[in-house]
Amino acid sequence: MQSRFLYLILFLVISFTAHSQNGIIRGNIFDNTTGDPIMFGNVILEGTSIGATTDLDGFFSLPEIPAGNYKLISTYVSYDTDTLEVKIAANQILYQRIVLYESAFNLGVVNVSATKEKARSDVQISTLKISSKQLKSLPSTGGEPDIAQYLSVLPGIISSGDQGGQLYIRGGSPIQNKIMLDGMTIYNPFHSIGFFSVFETEIIKNVDVLTGGFNAEHGGRISAVVDIHTKEGNKKRFGGILSGSPFLAKALIEGPIKPFNEKSGTSASFLITGKQSLIDKTSPIFYNYATTDSTGTLPYKFRDIYAKISLLGGKGSKLNLFGFNFTDGVNYSDIAKLNWNSTGGGAKFSVIPPASNLTVDGNISYSKYDIVLDEGDGKPRTSSIEGFSAGLTFKSYHKDSEFKYGFELNGYKTQFKFTNFLNNTIEQIDNTTELSVFSKYKKKWNNLIIEPGVRIIYYASLSQGVVEPRI
């Protein structure tokens, strides 16, 4: 038995030594014009089968590369191909910053898209990926594209107009859906009018809609996850958008605080966007047939503001700081007034350690949602929920496999207050904290991909833990 154990230890040591003789190439791909990361771009070592697809931050990692000289080829649809000579030594971790230029020639039909390449290495079952371009391609109410209108036409999703756009995804109720904006939970993402969400289409970079099951990195809901990522401000030049319609007016301004430097890879940029409803002002002129109360106007009013500052380090590490304020009101004359206000902010960062195969992502955020219902009795009902979230995620890259693990801490406070028919005030306040740890392993064998994972959640208010295995 002892000899077998010694042979096993020797085998593991030899295997680790052989593995450690290989090097790692990783880096980021950026757009030359704006400095934005290029999502789902392709990188490959010429003459080998070693390649990868960039993530939402334009990051890629090529692990377990034998020492030697290579040509690193980077491609993306409608961009010129970039070829870079690289030399990798044993045990070396090499970082490469790549800048792609838009092609000066018109390309013909492209049969293989970056999204299809991404699908070859990611599990796509019950996952819908939506880009800003797709949102804008759908005919929209009032000429203003919005994700609230786009989601309602997707298979398995039903939208209800009761108190705004309520989503029923594959039979689940709206409260069972988790809506996230840059890692923050948004408690009410839709306005009362139902056609518009709090998210500005112009700043959306990517939307992942997980409709039929999600792995261990997500928790707290049982139906679906809608994960919205916003773009960063233009790192090269100032710009903006100003538009209006009978429904709303909106504006966006973005630009560099410190312009993107291709040599150092550093930059700082900002982005501010806002929209204000006009339907309460324009309805007597354009939609008087739809008004039913004595005021002669449609009773809807809303305003959304979002701001973001992005800092980029020379080795691909980045920090995003953001904040928002969303307000909504509906006034049914002589019946009821409903107003809500949602505010919050946070930070999200990515760290690429220079001497490790790990990447580290983290976030911390706080948000609060207040709602007031004022009926004819003059006794308003109020409720609110506020919460904070913090977490770290670690990810290591290996040949044909990835390992992801981390933890998440969430705290919530809910408050409800109203006066009953006996003129007694009833108030309830609750607090709870959740601590979650998770791990997920992804392995690819040719056309087969498996992703087993496990999430462990501890509920402080119940002094109880739950284990959730997933695959």
Image (cartoon, helix red, strand yellow):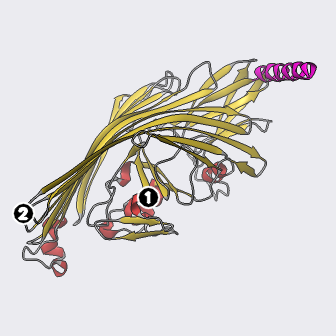
Occupied quadrant, residue 412: top left
Find residue 351 and name its label: none
Residue at left offset 69%, top offset 25%? 24
- Image quadrant holding the N terminus, namely top right
Give the image location of residue 7, x and y in percent.
Answer: 90, 21
Mark earlier in primary sequence (2, 1): 1
Is 13 covered by the magenta stretch?
A: yes
Image check: 312 left or right of 107? left
Give the image location of residue 58, x and y in percent.
Answer: 55, 38
Residue at left offset 8%, top offset 61%? 423
Image check: 450 left or right of 231? right
Give the image location of residue 238, x and y in percent.
Answer: 32, 38
Q: Magenta region's main secondary structure?
A: helix
Number of marks in the image?
A: 2
Reading the image, the residue beneath label 2 is: 378
Q: What amino acid is labelled 2 in the image? A: Gly
Secondary structure, mark 2, is loop
Task: Look at the numbered discs 2 and 1 and tell me whether their residues touch, using CB distance below 8 Å.
Answer: no
Q: Alpha carbon of mark 2 to alpha carbon of mark 1: how far?
A: 33 Å
Occupied quadrant, residue 69: top right
Q: Nearer the viewer, residue 73 or 207?
A: 207
Q: What amino acid is labelled 1 in the image? A: Gln
Give the image location of residue 146, x and y in percent.
Answer: 37, 60
Is 414 covered by the magenta stretch?
A: no
Reading the image, the residue beneath label 1 is: 176
The stretch of residues the image draws in magenta is 1-22
Residue at left offset 21%, top offset 66%? 246
**44, above or below 468, in the image:** above
**426, above or below 92, in the image:** below
**Can residue 385 be seen?**
yes
